[in-house]
């Protein structure tokens, strides 16, 4: 055959082996072993080599279009749709293939990647990760849940940044997200509450060292007497539920949730843009209703052990009383307490009624409701405005003054100088005898 032949490395190897067979220096049995083929297949390959020479070793389909190839019109349609909708969002081939499938354009992500590379619409990116010691996954679902806040331009740079509270199970990579404006204590509580309502109470949380989760302050005098460690409001909620908080010393230590953040930053941003969602409330509803479940269906894996470490919520336990802010206040002499520049009057019909100088617990729920507790029992109270407080205390002071003032002396009229009472006894007796 005239011209040049393009042969693969495997075909060149077969050529050298079969030449030895052709010259009688190697048997077909040994040739089959060297080429890792069956004896019957070696017979067929050798027959083609004898009949056609080197060209008989070249694959018959080389240079021809595959029978399973997509039509050119379909390829042009896919690339055109990618340019129209997904290129501006910088969608990668994997995510773009999923979204195209939703539109009825089913294409394998690797095929799309190859088409985009050939069309100059996508560039290869090489990553050079630093060397890290691998930590084995936990064996059971709920044994350890990683938690982190991801600050990102979720709605585009012109809308500013928001924070995704992301929770990822270490054993299964199941994820749950909540979108809020900042990584606050309330956002962390709401995310953990959503996880508990869906899966149960996990054994431990793996977080960073932000003051939302742990505190570095010294214990107060009351905490020292009680032998308690200083806790944040989030830490108190976890302590009540029996959840251990483990802190990571680097972002790489909780790499599972960090990689999950990257998945959200890739997929959620594009999904929000495609749906034209621009508010945290609407985006969080999307996360809760369908987006997180779709991620778990695609990326979650089975744990090594089937046992679920999540504990059910105890009966009678109200999560509103767990996820809240708690502080102690001292009852004043007029049975009022002051909390955050507001005054609360403890009502007299409480039984038992706390005494002045007693300490009561002020519990502020996440929805703004305030509750007072004494010895673990709720107290009836009412909030006072500054005007009501001033009038009440003025009345209270007046009552105290009246109670301690000396009795008033009688103001009697003095009789006149010629009044009979001023006359002597003899004069009064003389008038009587007349």
Image: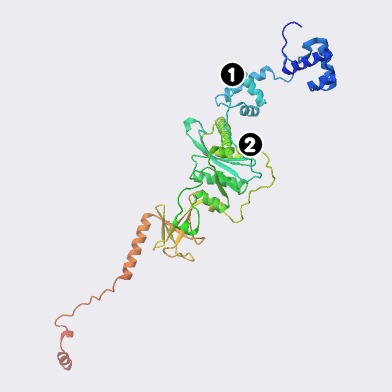
Q: Quadrant of the N terminus?
A: top right
Q: Secondary structure at mark 1?
A: loop
Q: Secondary structure at mark 2?
A: helix
Please indicate whether residue 341 sits to the left or right of residue 249 in the image: left
* Residue hosting label 2: 294
Residue toward you, 380 or 365: 365
Q: In the rendered image of this protein, does residue 208 appear above or below residue 115? A: below
Q: Are marks 2 and 1 in contact (CB under 8 Å)?
A: no
Residue 63 lies in quadrant = top right
First in sequence: mark 2 vs mark 1: 1
* Residue hosting label 1: 120
Q: Residue furthest top?
A: 2
Q: Residues within 10 Å of mark 1 (few under 14, many from 20)?
A: few
Residue toward you, 100 or 20: 20
Residue 346 location in percent, x, y?
A: 44, 61
State whether residue 285 appears in this view.
Answer: no
Q: In the rendered image of this protein, does residue 77 appear above or below residue 201? A: above
């Amino acid at each position: 055959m005239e011209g040049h032949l393009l042969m693969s490395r495997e075909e060149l190897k077969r050529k050298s082996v079969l030449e030895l067979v052709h010259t009688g220096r190697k048997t077909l049995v040994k040739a089959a072993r060297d080429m890792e083929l069956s004896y019957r297949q070696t017979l067929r390959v050798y027959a083609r080599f004898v009949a056609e020479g080197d060209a008989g070793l070249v694959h018959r389909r080389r240079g021809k279009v595959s029978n399973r190839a997509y039509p050119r019109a379909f390829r042009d349609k896919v690339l055109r749709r990618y340019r129209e909708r997904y290129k501006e969002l910088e969608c990668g081939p994997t995510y773009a293939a999923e979204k195209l499938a939703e539109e009825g354009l089913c294409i394998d992500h690797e095929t799309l990647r190859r088409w985009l590379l050939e069309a100059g619409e996508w560039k290869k990116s090489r990553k050079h990760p630093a060397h890290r010691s691998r930590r084995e996954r936990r064996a059971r679902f709920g044994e350890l849940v990683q938690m982190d806040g991801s600050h990102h331009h979720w709605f585009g740079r012109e809308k500013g940044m928001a924070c995704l509270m992301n929770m990822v199970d270490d054993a299964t990579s199941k994820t749950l997200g909540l979108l809020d404006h900042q990584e606050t204590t309330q956002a962390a509580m709401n995310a953990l509450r959503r996880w508990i309502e869906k899966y149960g109470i996990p054994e431990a949380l793996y977080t960073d060292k932000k003051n939302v989760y742990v505190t570095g302050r010294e214990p107060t005098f009351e905490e020292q007497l009680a032998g308690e460690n200083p806790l944040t409001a989030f830490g108190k909620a976890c302590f009540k539920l029996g959840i251990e908080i483990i802190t990571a010393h680097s972002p790489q230590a909780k790499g599972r949730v960090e990689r999950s953040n990257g998945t959200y930053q890739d997929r959620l941003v594009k999904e929000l843009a495609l749906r034209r969602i621009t508010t945290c409330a609407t985006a969080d509803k999307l996360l809760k209703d369908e987006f997180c479940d779709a991620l778990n269906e695609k990326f979650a894996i089975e744990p090594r052990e089937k046992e679920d470490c999540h504990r059910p919520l105890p009966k009678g336990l109200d999560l509103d009383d767990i996820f809240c802010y708690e502080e102690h206040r001292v009852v004043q002499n007029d049975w009022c307490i002051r909390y955050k520049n507001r005054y609360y009057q403890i009502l007299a019909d409480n039984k038992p009624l706390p005494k002045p100088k007693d300490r009561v617990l002020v519990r502020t729920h996440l929805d703004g409701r305030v509750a007072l507790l004494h010895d673990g029992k709720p107290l009836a109270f009412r909030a006072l405005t500054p005007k009501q407080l001033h009038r009440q205390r003025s009345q209270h002071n007046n009552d105290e003054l009246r109670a301690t003032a000396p009795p008033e002396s009688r103001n009697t009229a003095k009789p006149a100088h010629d009044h009979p009472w001023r006359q002597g006894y003899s004069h009064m007796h003389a008038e009587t005898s007349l």
